[in-house]
Image (spheres, rainbow, N blue to C red):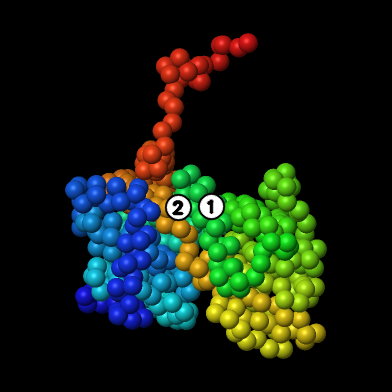
């Protein structure tokens, strides 16, 4: 058993082990990398602080890093996303110092971040940039030993780019989110399926025939809209970017301002990475029984403070559902405290898609072990070769073959002189 950890209950370890084994069956790319790491030990001696959603797939990533020779400390990247059985398994059976308990308060969340940083990392792995921002504001003494870091999600990358632009980022970061084999699949198909899954698990309401409002038509929003439509919902998209809005229109959705959508929506799901997307004026006109949730990284997209102030009472009516009773008698239901609904009320992305995201994480860390010291204090994309390799490994695991360019096709595709 690990000497130091803070998890809910170590007795949950067996359940966690079974669930991690189940996830591993759908993670062939990461499994292949794990075998390679076992042989070559590319991370020998490396200390990694990881702040990620503590899920079955993350456990598989941590096993892979450890197999590659790294020491890993792990904490949660969201107070409501921890799977307590997985945390117990990693602590009890893999000797990983894990600091994560589902439902932890803000103080505990940050204490866990500090406990994770006690490893004195060479590499940080973030999902939302809370490790990087804590290091830069409170733990600057750690900067001396840090070589580089990785970032998993859109919101984290935005925060880090803004640090780099202000000249305050003190070590290089690889933006795993920006790999094509990450955001095109994880954000779209992963968030699409798991968000709808979270909504259904929390509410058991019928989507068919409902009006389902998706705020933000980025990679995640496209996935959620597509899956909600697949369940028979009439999907309405709200956007602030004309291009994305136009794309939603041509994809066949209704597009309108939130103030208009607020009056007709049965379900609302924000996924913008922005603050106060649904706020006072919208709550004021929503229908009785409306269901509100968020799948963006932070719990800032639905203005719950304003909703709380407008409501005369708030109470929990089901697991992961709180009803806000409005003064005029309407009931507005909020799922998972406005935190990422796919992790709060379901299990997060299916393993098969996290396979690619975490393959990018593992290969990016190996890249940083080799090249990190030569990089500038900037945000870098995942090297193209890694992206290509992950896609090729995934196709191979699915037993799908594709054509190869013939020599004359290769030549044609980079020439200009051959016309009609
Ligand atoms: N739930 C999950 O598991 C999960 C997975 C991946 C990413 N994320 C998070 O989801 C969020 C979105 O990620 P993405 O990759 O789709 O980002 P993206 O940048 O591709 O898309 C965000 C979209 O939101 C729009 N937007 C911004 N402010 C808005 C507003 N006030 N009203 C309406 N639209 C607005 C933007 O124009 C953009 O089109 C981020 O916070 C990201 O970190 C969550």
Q: Residue at 30% of width from left, 79% of height from top?
A: 10
> Mark 1: which secondary structure?
helix
Residue 201's spot in the image, x, y percent? Answer: 55, 70
Q: Is residue 325 above or below residue 343?
A: below
> Mark 2: which secondary structure?
helix
Residue 332's spot in the image, x, y percent? Answer: 70, 77
Residue 23's spot in the image, x, y percent? Answer: 37, 59
Q: Which sits in the foreground, 62 or 31?
A: 31
Q: Is residue 94 above or below residue 171?
A: below
Q: Is residue 249 above or below residue 192?
A: above
Q: Residue at 62% of width from left, 81% of height from top?
A: 322
Q: Quadrant of residue 232?
A: bottom right
Residue 291's spot in the image, x, y percent? Answer: 67, 72
Q: Which sits in the foreground, 232 or 282?
A: 232
Callout 2 environment at 10 Å: few (<14), some (14 to 19), or many (20+)?
A: many
Marking on residue 172: none
Residue that protrudes farthest toward the bottom in the picture:
312
| Left or right position of 59 against 250 | left
Quarter containing the N terminus: bottom left
Residue 388 in view: no
Marking on residue 353: 2
Q: Which residue is mark 1?
A: 189
- Whether tag 2 and tag 1 are in contact, CB under 8 A, the answer is yes
Q: Residue at 71% of width from left, 85% of height from top?
A: 325
């Amino acid at each position: 058993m690990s000497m130091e950890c803070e998890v809910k209950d170590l007795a949950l370890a067996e359940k966690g082990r079974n669930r991690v084994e189940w996830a591993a069956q759908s993670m062939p790319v990461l499994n292949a990398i794990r075998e390679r790491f076992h042989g070559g030990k590319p991370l020998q001696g490396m200390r990694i602080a990881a702040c990620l959603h503590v899920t079955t797939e993350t456990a598989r990533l941590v096993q892979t890093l450890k197999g590659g020779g790294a020491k890993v400390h792990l904490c949660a990247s969201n107070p409501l996303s921890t799977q307590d059985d997985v945390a117990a398994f990693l602590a009890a059976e893999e000797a990983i110092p894990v600091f994560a308990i589902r439902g932890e308060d803000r103080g505990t969340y940050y204490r866990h971040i500090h406990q994770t940083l006690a490893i004195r990392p060479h590499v940080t792995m973030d999902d939302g940039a809370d490790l990087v921002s804590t290091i830069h504001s409170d733990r600057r003494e750690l900067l001396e030993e840090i070589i580089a870091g990785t970032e998993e999600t859109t919101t984290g990358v935005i925060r880090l780019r803004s640090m780099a632009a202000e000249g305050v980022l003190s070590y290089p970061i690889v933006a795993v989110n920006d790999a094509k084999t990450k955001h095109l699949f994880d954000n779209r198909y992963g968030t699409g399926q798991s968000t709808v899954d979270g909504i259904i698990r929390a509410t058991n309401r019928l989507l068919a025939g409902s009006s389902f409002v998706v705020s933000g038509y980025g990679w995640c929003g496209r996935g959620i809209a597509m899956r909600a439509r697949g369940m028979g919902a009439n999907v309405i998209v709200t956007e602030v970017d004309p291009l994305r809005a136009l794309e939603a229109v041509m994809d066949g959705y209704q597009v309108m301002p939130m103030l208009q959508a607020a009056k007709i929506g049965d379900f609302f799901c924000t996924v913008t990475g922005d603050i106060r997307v649904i706020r006072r004026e919208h709550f004021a006109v929503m229908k009785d029984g409306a269901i509100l949730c968020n799948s963006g990284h932070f719990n800032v997209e639905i203005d719950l403070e304003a909703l709380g102030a407008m409501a005369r009472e708030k109470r929990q009516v089901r697991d992961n559902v709180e009803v806000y009773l409005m003064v005029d008698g309407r009931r507005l239901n909020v799922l998972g405290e406005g935190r990422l609904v796919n992790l709060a009320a379901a299990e997060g992305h299916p393993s098969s898609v996290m396979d690619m995201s975490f393959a990018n994480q593992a290969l990016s860390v190996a890249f940083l072990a080799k090249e990190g010291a030569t990089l500038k204090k900037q945000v870098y994309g995942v090297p193209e070769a890694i992206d290509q390799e992950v896609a090729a490994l995934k196709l191979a695991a699915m037993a799908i073959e594709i054509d190869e360019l013939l020599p004359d096709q290769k030549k044609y595709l980079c020439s200009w002189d051959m016309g009609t």
